[in-house]
């Protein structure tokens, strides 16, 4: 058990040393990844704006509401979510605002949700134009108000809050994309180094002999020492030739 743990620690240490030896490359990949994805997010992606209108579900127009009315209103919220995104409502909104888009395209820009533990329905519209995003959200509330009362034969739901124009885009999140790009660059660089190190089976030291070949190293001949000895022999021969020439 201890040997396994030691082996894991050695591997992690080797990876750390590998990263430190190639730290400039890792930093370059990290910066490049963040820069590329950041530029793509700023200049290539279309900014989207989100506006939200709110509807309050009613089951009775009387001023006195019973517990049963409240429970029924909460249960009707699921039906409201489905009916607000029905084809007649979506197509009517597109027609009223003269959007010139298909049912599928407009439906993809709308999200209807119920606020938890309430009878509030949120109609969120995400659109490239902040003014149109506000107008579409308000138009959905108005068209749904009449359509729901007609189909379900109940009092019209109340528009609790009209949508307002958003000043800042809801997407893309440039800071998050830059960090994501930097993380991708970091992972790619580290992954490349680790894979290259794993595939490289070159034996460079006595430790590699013991690790990969499971053999004990008895002796090693330094390459620099051999070069120095040969240089010394050549110099000795040269000097001996000079001396012989001098005697002659």
Image (cartoon, rainbow, N blue to C red):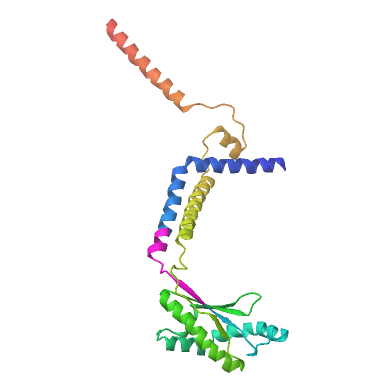
The verdict on residue 46 being magenta is yes
Towards the viewer: 193 or 219: 193
Q: Nearer the viewer, residue 216 or 11?
A: 11
Position of residue 163 relative to residue 227, above or below, is below
Q: With 44 as the anchor, is 112 left or right in this view? A: right
Is 182 positioned to the left or the right of 83 in the image? left
Residue at 34 percent across and 11 percent down: it is: 240
Q: Position of residue 72 (x, y in %)?
A: 68, 86
Q: Is residue 152 above or below residue 99?
A: below
Q: Nearer the viewer, residue 219 or 74?
A: 74
- Magenta stretch bounds: 38-52
Q: Residue at x 59, y 27 (%)?
A: 218
Residue 161: x and y in percent read 53, 79
Residue ranking furthest to the front: 63
The outermost residue toward the top is 247
Q: Position of residue 133 (x, y in %)?
A: 45, 77
């Amino acid at each position: 058990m201890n040997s396994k743990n030691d082996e894991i620690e050695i591997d992690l240490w080797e990876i750390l040393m590998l990263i430190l030896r190639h730290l400039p490359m890792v930093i370059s990949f990290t910066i490049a990844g963040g820069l590329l994805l950041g530029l793509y997010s700023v200049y290539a992606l279309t900014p989207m704006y989100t506006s939200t209108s709110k509807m309050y579900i009613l089951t009775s127009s009387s001023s006195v509401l019973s517990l049963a009315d409240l429970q029924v209103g909460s249960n009707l919220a699921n039906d409201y979510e489905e009916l607000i995104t029905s084809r007649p409502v979506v197509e009517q909104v597109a027609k009223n605002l003269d959007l010139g888009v298909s049912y599928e395209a407009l439906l993809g820009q709308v999200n209807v949700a119920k606020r938890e533990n309430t009878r509030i329905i949120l109609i969120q519209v995400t659109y490239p134009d902040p003014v149109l995003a506000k107008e579409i959200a308000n138009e959905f509330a108005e068209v749904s108000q009449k359509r729901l009362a007609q189909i379900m034969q109940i009092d019209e739901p109340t528009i609790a809050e009209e949508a307002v124009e958003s000043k800042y885009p809801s997407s893309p999140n440039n800071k998050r994309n830059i960090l994501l790009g930097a993380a991708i660059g970091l992972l790619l660089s580290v992954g490349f180094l680790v894979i290259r190190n794993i595939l490289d089976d070159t034996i460079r030291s006595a430790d590699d002999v013991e690790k990969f070949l499971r053999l004990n190293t008895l002796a090693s001949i330094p390459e620099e020492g051999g070069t120095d000895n040969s240089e010394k022999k050549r110099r000795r021969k040269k000097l001996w030739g000079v001396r012989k020439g001098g005697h002659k």
